[in-house]
Image: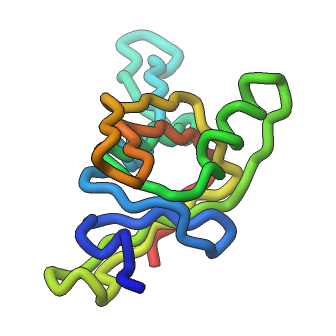
């Protein structure tokens, strides 16, 4: 059986298991809040300190999955059960097989799920996009 995700540039792995392939991944990253303050005394200089680290939501777009795990996960969050999971986003080399990069997102959960137009001529479930929020990020 051919790998259904091979033509997609990014795979989403939940707890190490591939659950979807995506053409686009955007927003992955983090920011450190800048805190500005003025030193005490006459003519005090402005200083800046690093504040809290914030991770930006990851949006995976134009994907495909035969598994219902993404929808079930999203539905559980919508019903009030936040299931935080460790996920990885794997980017492939041009050959579509060799791993180029891997980003690990810890304590992630789906905040948005969007389905594209459904086509009865295709046997796979098309996913327009899924947005994941998470607590920590590392790149392998």
The residue lying furthest to the left in this view is 94
Residue at horizontal 40 percent and vertical 42 percent from the top: 127
Q: Please count the marks in the image.
A: 0
Between residues 8 and 45, which one lies in front from this camera angle? 8
Q: Where on the picture, by quarter, is residue 94?
A: bottom left
Which color scheme did the rendering employ for the protein? Answer: rainbow
The residue lying furthest to the front in this view is 121
The spot of residue 136 in percent (x, y) is 61, 54
Q: Where on the picture, by quarter, is residue 2?
A: bottom left
Image-based side of 86 in relation to 46, left or right? right
The spot of residue 89 in percent (x, y) is 45, 64
Residue at horizontal 70 percent and vertical 31 percent from the top: 75
Residue at horizontal 79 percent and vertical 36 percent from the top: 82
The spot of residue 124 in percent (x, y) is 41, 53
Between residues 138 and 96, which one lies in front from this camera angle? 96
The spot of residue 132 in percent (x, y) is 53, 41
Between residues 106 and 51, which one lies in front from this camera angle? 106
Image-based side of 113 in relation to 82, left or right? left
The residue lying furthest to the right in this view is 81
131 is higher (above) or lower (below) than 2: above
The residue lying furthest to the top in this view is 42
Residue at horizontal 39 percent and vertical 38 percent from the top: 129
16 is higher (above) or lower (below) than 41: below
45 is higher (above) or lower (below) than 41: below
Q: Where on the picture, by quarter, is residue 8?
A: bottom left
Which quarter of the rendered picture does the N terminus lie within?
bottom left
Between residues 51 and 15, which one lies in front from this camera angle? 15
């Amino acid at each position: 059986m051919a790998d259904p995700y091979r033509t997609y540039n990014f795979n989403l792995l939940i707890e190490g298991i591939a659950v979807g392939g995506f053409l686009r991944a955007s927003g992955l990253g983090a920011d450190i809040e800048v805190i500005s303050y003025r030193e005490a005394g006459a003519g005090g200089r402005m200083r800046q300190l690093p504040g809290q680290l914030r991770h930006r939501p990851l949006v995976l777009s134009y994907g495909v999955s035969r598994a219902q795990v993404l929808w079930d996960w999203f539905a559980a969050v919508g019903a009030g059960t936040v299931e935080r999971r460790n996920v990885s986003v794997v980017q492939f080399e041009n050959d579509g097989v060799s791993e180029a990069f891997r980003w690990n997102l810890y304590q992630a959960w789906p905040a948005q799920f969007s389905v594209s137009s459904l086509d009865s001529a295709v046997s796979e479930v098309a996913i327009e996009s899924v947005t994941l929020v998470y607590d920590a990020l590392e790149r392998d």
